Each structure stands twice: as C-alpha cells, then as structure tokens.
C-alpha cells in the first residue's frame, strides 16, 4: 500500500537490479516515515541519527542487524552507490522535522531534488547506468523533481493534518492563500489555483525529461 509507483517501476526494472532498487526504496520509505512517527523533532533527529550511522556502516560493509541496512550493504557492494545522493536524502528528511512551509518554489524544487531526485540518481546506478552519463542524470533529475512535486501535492491533506504544507509561501501569496487556510484541510478556489501552479511546474520537468528520451541509450 506504500509507494505503489516505485513498486510498479520495480516490476519493469531489469531483474538483476531489483534487489538494489528494493534496498533503496525501503531506505527512502523508512526515513520518510520518521517525521510522521514522532511528536517531537528531537526524537526524530535521534532516529535519523541512527539511520545515518546505520547507512554509514552499511556502506562500509558492516551493517547493523536491520534488514534494510543489510540489503543496502549488499546492494552497495555490487553497485557502489554515490554516497552524496544517500546523504542528500537523509539531510532532507532531517530538515523535514522543522519545516512548516517552503519559502518559495526554488526551495520546494531543491527538496524534490534531494529526495525523489537523489533516489532517481541512485536508481540509475542500481540499473547499471554509467555515472558519467550526463544526459541520463539530467533526465533523472527532471523525473525526480516531477515525481517529488506530484507526491507532495497528493499528500497535501495528510501534511495539513500534521501541521505543515509543501505549498511554498510565495505560491500561496500569489493566490491569496493563507497558511491557516491550507492547514485547515478545506478545499478552496485559491488552493486549487496554487496546486495547479505546482502541477504545471511538475509537468514542465516531466516534459523536459521526455525531450531527452531520444538522446538516451
């Protein structure tokens, strides 16, 4: 019931890459759940600190007794993941603990780059795409941002229930949408307009990725 899109992508992935992809998707899901599983940011930071330590030892070949960490260690031994992408995911999850609302669209795009975008880059590596393939990396960037923005839009009501939103303040201001109104969870024309602006931005990234398709091997 979680992350159905990536599960469907997994079915279409090369069989040799699936174990590594499962490890990556599981790490992403575990760390994404931290914010909603705690009531205090300090507790969330403690949990993410454990994940940072576990990921570090997993990438060094000595994972703790945790199935996700062990799967990541095995996958890294085969693939050799770029560590900065893994660190970007963890950094974004930690920033999530304090984030109530992005200041502007650029901050939201950066967040999507660090989460879905970084995961997409790691997925390319799991599938054996050379790390120096700039066109593939650029396409992954755009797909990741598009997917990330679609995910936060879909989760808008859920996030409102947690007292936060990923609708940037500048986008909300343009549509005369107050933070109080967003967090109420009630539909409104202003909310629809703000969501449409974000959906349009996501679509532009998806189209940019598709435009690169003919240049990919």
Image (tube, rainbow, N blue to C red):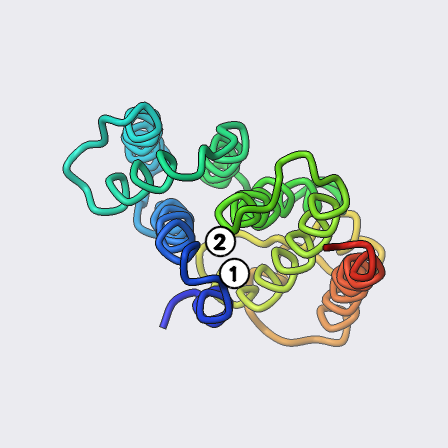
**Residue 36 at x, y percent in the picture:** 37, 52
The image's mark for residue 160 is 1
**Disc 2 and disc 1: Cα gap in Å?**
5 Å
* Foreground pick, 63 / 193: 63
Q: Position of residue 64 (x, y in %)?
A: 18, 32
**97 lies left or right of 148:** left
Mark 1 residue crowding within 10 angstroms, few (<14) / some (14–19) / many (20+): many
Q: At 70% across and 40% down in the image, what residue appears?
A: 133
Q: Is residue 46 left or right of residue 6?
A: left
Name the image quarter holding the C terminus: bottom right
Residue 39 x/y as whole percent: 32, 45
Residue drawn at x 32%, y 27% is 49
Given contact means CB atoms under 8 Å apart, are the residues at marks 2 and 1 in contact?
Answer: yes
Give the numbered dot on residue 163: 2
| Label 2 packing within 10 angstroms: few (<14), some (14-19), many (20+) | some
Note whether 177 is above or below 170 in the view shown: below
Vertically, is 85 above or below 174? above
* Quadrant of the image containing the N terminus: bottom left
Mark sitting on residue 193: none
Q: Is residue 6 left or right of residue 101?
A: left
As displayed, is residue 194 above or below residue 24? below
Q: Secondary structure at mark 1?
A: helix
């Amino acid at each position: 019931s979680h992350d159905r899109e990536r599960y469907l992508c997994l079915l279409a992935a090369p069989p040799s890459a699936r174990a590594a992809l499962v490890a990556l998707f599981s790490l992403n899901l575990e760390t994404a759940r931290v914010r909603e599983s705690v009531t205090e940011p300090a507790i969330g930071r403690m949990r993410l600190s454990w994940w940072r330590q576990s990921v570090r030892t997993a990438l060094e070949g000595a994972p703790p007794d945790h199935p996700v960490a062990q799967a990541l260690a095995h996958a890294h031994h085969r693939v050799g993941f770029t560590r900065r992408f893994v660190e970007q995911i963890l950094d974004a999850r930690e920033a999530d603990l304090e984030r109530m609302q992005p200041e502007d669209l650029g901050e939201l795009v950066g967040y999507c780059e660090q989460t879905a975008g970084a995961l997409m880059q790691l997925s390319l590596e799991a599938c054996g795409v050379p790390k120096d393939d700039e066109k593939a990396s650029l396409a992954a960037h755009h797909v990741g941002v598009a997917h990330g923005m679609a995910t936060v839009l879909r989760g808008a009501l859920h996030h409102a229930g947690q007292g936060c939103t990923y609708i940037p303040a500048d986008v909300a201001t343009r549509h005369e949408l107050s933070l109080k109104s967003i967090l109420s969870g009630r539909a409104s024309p202003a909310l629809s307009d703000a969501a449409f602006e974000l959906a349009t931005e996501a679509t532009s990234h998806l189209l940019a990725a598709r435009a690169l398709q003919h240049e990919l091997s």
